Amino acid sequence: MAELTAFLRGARVADEVLALRPDYRALLLAVDGLEPGDSDERSEALLAQAEAAAAEAMADSPVTELPNVAAWREAYRAFGAKPQRTRNSLEALLRRAATGLPRVNRLTDIYNAICVRHQIPLGGEDLARYVGPPRLLRATGEEPFDTASGGESVIEHPEPGEVVWADDAGVTCRRWNWRQCRRTQLTDATTSALFILDALEPVDDDALRAAGDELAEHLRRLGPRVEVARRLLPGA
């Protein structure tokens, strides 16, 4: 637990990001002791509940008019991104819910279900692949981003001013919560992970913590020695 807490202690949100969106907060969960496994009955039930919740939320409103989605579309425009072309992770999953959320493995299934149920963008990455602590910043445009194009590994770079999560080795997620890099992506062998829950108004701290609590509850069922440390950003 001490190592997880120390890792989170180094996490930062840059002042220039908070100047862009003073209402931004992130809840980070660092987790160890996970036992990998295929999708199972429990994760299937969570995804089914999330699909039902998404259908109810969008019964009378298009996805773009949901308050939490609209807030992120506005945030994307603020740093020059086009939300109709690069959708935040919450909107992307909500759009898929009508035809069925992806079934990947029980770890990924859990965090996708929590993202949709709570309508909070939520990313999961392999903690063992991190080089230094996570930082949310506005890119210079020179940072490397490890991704794929046409089935081949490529290194891209964010646009100058783009909001990105990064560690000492490069960008881990572009456009705040749009696309994660390949280096830190979760795999079927992941045993330690970092989860980032992003929040803008109208999501308050109580709602953010509730989503984190539910995520932690389900993660603790993925092994008898699972440890979970958390930190709310920005913070001292």
Image (cartoon, helix red, strand yellow):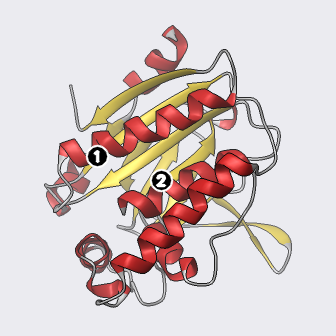
The residue that mark 1 highlights is 208
Of the pair 72 and 156, the residue shown nearer to us = 72
The three-letter code of the residue at mark 2 reads Ile
Apparent side of residue 21 relative to residue 225 in the rendered image (left or right): left
Which residue: 71% across, 56% down? Answer: 182
Q: Position of residue 66 (x, y in %)?
A: 28, 79
The alpha-carbon separation of the residues under discs 1 and 2 comes to 11 Å
Apparent side of residue 7 relative to residue 39 in the rendered image (left or right): left
Quadrant in the picture for the C terminus: top left
Tell which residue pokes out farthest to the right in this image.
Answer: 151
Apparent side of residue 99 relative to residue 7 in the rendered image (left or right): right
Which residue: 67% across, 45% down? Answer: 107
Q: How many marks?
A: 2
Tell which residue pokes out farthest to the top in this image.
Answer: 2
The local secondary structure at tag 2 comes to: helix
Kindly identify which numbered label has been placed on residue 114. 2
Q: Position of residue 105 (x, y in %)?
A: 75, 51
The three-letter code of the residue at mark 1 reads Leu
Q: Indicate which disc, 1 or 2, sits on the residue closer to the N terminus.
A: 2
